[in-house]
Image (cartoon, rainbow, N blue to C red):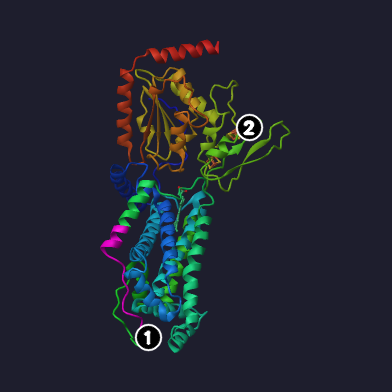
Amino acid sequence: MHATEAPPLRTPLHGTPLRMTLRFALQRIETGFDAAFGAKANPCRHLGGTAFFLFFVVAGTGACLYAAFDTRVDGAYESVERITRGAWPLSGVARSLHRYASDAFVLIVLLHGLREWINGHAHGFRWYSWVSGVPLVWLVYASGLGGYWLVFDRLALWSLVATTEWLDALPLFGGALARNFIADGVTNRLFSLLIFLHIGIPLALLLGMWVHIQRISRPRTRPPRLLAFGLTAALVLLSLAKPATSDAPADLALASPNVHPDWLYQAIHPLFYASSGTLLWIAAGALTVALGLLPWLPPAKRPPAARVDLANCNGCGRCFADCPYVAVTMRPRTDGRPLPREAVVDAALCAACGICAGACPSSTPFRSGEVLHTGIDLPQRPIGSVRDELARGLANLRGAPRVVVFGCDCAANARALQASDTAVLSLPCAAMWPPSFVEFALRSGVDGVLIAGCRDGDCAYRLGNRWIEQRLRGMREPHLRGTVPIERVETAWCGPFDGTALARELARFRERLGALPAARLALFKRRQEVIDG
Ligand code: HEM
Ligand code: SF4
Ligand code: SF4
C-alpha cells in the first residue's frame, strides 16, 4: 500500500441518513430499470426530458381539441361531448390523450424534482435549477386544474367553486369572487377568462421551462426515441381502454354534487373543505418558500471555481464545448497575443467539476517543465499536482499485472481498490482525466488503465462519462491517440453504492490483462522511446 492521492474534495456519499437511505433505494430501483431498458434509455434518467415531451403532447392535443371546442358557456359541454363521440376520427382518443398526458406530466415533474433532491441536486451551484423548478410545479398544477373547468360539467363547477372559495381566503379578493360567481353564474365573459387562463398559464409554464434549463449546456429536453414511443403507445392504449368522459352538465342549483375528482390535480379541494382556505394558503406558501430556500439550508461552502491561465490558453474552445454548466465563454483576446479568443469562466456558474481541465490541450503530462501549468485548472486540484501524484504512484507499483485506476469522487469509492499492484487516484469527475494521462501511465510501465466514473448516463456532472467515451473512441478532442493499445484501457461505470461492482470490474480487467500478449504494449513503448529520442 502506498499514498498516491490527495484526499477527495467531496465524499461520494454525503447527506442526511434519510436522503442517503432514499438514494440507496433509488439506485436499486434504477438498477432494475437499467436491466429492462438499458442504461442510456433508463426512464429515471430522462424525467426532465420526458416532462418536456409530455408538455408538447398536451399542447398538441389541446390545439386539436380547441379547433372543435365551442368557446361559449352554453355550447362548451356539448362540444366536448361531440369531441368524445367523434367530431373527427380519433377525436375521443385526442381528448383522452390530453387528459392522461396531463396526469403523467404532473406525476413526472414531481418524480423529477424528488429524484433531483434525493441525488443531492438541491444545493450548491445547482441552486438556480432547483429554485427555477419550484414555481414550475405550481404552473403545471394550475394549467391542469384550469383544463377541467372548460369541460363545464358538474366536476368543473365543483372545482371552480372550490377554487374561487379558496382564492377568496386571500385578502386581495376579500370574498368577492365566490359571491359574484354565485350571483351572476358563469357568464360568457368569465368563461372567456377561463379559456384565456388555460392557454396563458401553459405558455407561462413553457417560458418557465426555458428559464429552468438556462444554466445547463446541452439539456436533455427530449427522451430517447424508444422511451417517447413507448410512453405515447401506453397513453394511447389507456385512452382506448378507458376513454376520458364528462360528468353530467354543470348545474349551479346543485349544492354539493357527488363527483369523482382527479386526485392528481383536484386533491386540493377536499383538503380545502376539510381545513380552511387561510390554513391551506399558509401551508402551500410555507412549503413553496421552504422548497425555494432548500439550496441554502444549511448554507454550504462552494469549492473554488475553475481558473484560466492565459499564458497556457490558445483559445481552442474545447473547455467551452465540454463544460456541462455553461460556465465558460469564449471572448476576444485581452493579453495582446496574436490569437482571436480566450476562455473566461463565470465563477457563479462553475460546478468545480474539472471537466474543462480534462479537455484542455495544455493538460498533457508530457509537457516539459518541472511544474505542469495548464490553460484551465481547478485551484484545489491542479493538473500539475495530479501528474506528480501519478508519477509517484506509478513508481511505487509492484507485482503484475500493474493497474492504475483513474477514479471519480462522485462515483464508487475507487480508493478502496488501492493495493501494491494497483495505484488509485481520484478527481472530482472522471472526465477531468485527459486521455494523455492514460498514455502517460501506459508508457510509464503499467499494464492497464481503468477509468471509473458514475453509472452510465448518470454522471453527477451530467456529461462526464459521455465525453470520456467519445475521447477514448477518437470522436472528441482531446482524443486518445490511435497508437495507444486500447485493449489495455477499460471503463467502469459504477455509482456511489456500487463499490463491490467496481471491485468485480477491476478483477475482470486484471484477468483480461493477464491473458493479453505483451508484444503490442512493448512495441508501443519502444516506438515512443524512439520518437522521444
Ligand atoms: C415542467 C417542469 C420541469 C421540466 C420540464 C424540467 C426539465 C428539466 C430538464 C430538461 C433538465 C436538464 C436535465 C439534463 O439535461 O441533465 C432539468 C434539470 C434540473 N431540474 Fe428540472 N424540470 C422541471 C421541474 C423541476 C422541478 C419541480 C425541480 C425541483 C424543484 C427541478 C429540478 C431540477 C434540477 C435541480 C436540475 C439540474 C440537474 C443537474 O444539474 O444535474 N426541475 N430539468
Ligand atoms: S469546472 Fe466544470 S463547470 Fe467549472 S468551468 Fe470547468 S467544466 Fe465548467
Ligand atoms: S481548452 Fe484550454 S486552451 Fe482551449 S480555450 Fe479552454 S483554456 Fe484555452
* Amino acid at circle 1: Leu
- Tag in front: 2 or 1: 1
Asked whether mark 2 lies closer than 8 Å to ligand 3, one says yes
- Compared with 43, 409 (above or below) is above
What residue did someone put label 2 on?
313
Instruction: For the residues labelled 2 and 1, say whether their Cβ atoms are less than 8 Å apart.
Output: no
As measured in the structure, the alpha-carbon distance from the residue carrying label 2 to the one carrying label 1 is: 72 Å
Q: Tell me the quarter of the image containing the C terminus.
A: top right
Element class at badge 2: loop
Residue range highlighted in magenta: 236-252
Q: Residue at x 59, y 22 (%)?
A: 370
Q: Position of residue 367 (x, y in %)?
A: 57, 22
Q: Going by the image, does 121 lie left or right of 316?
A: left
427 is within the stretch colored magenta: no
Q: Residue at x 35, y 41 (%)?
A: 39
Q: Quadrant of ligand 2?
A: top right
- Total marks drawn? 2
What residue did someone put label 1 on?
252
Main secondary structure along the magenta-highlighted residues: loop
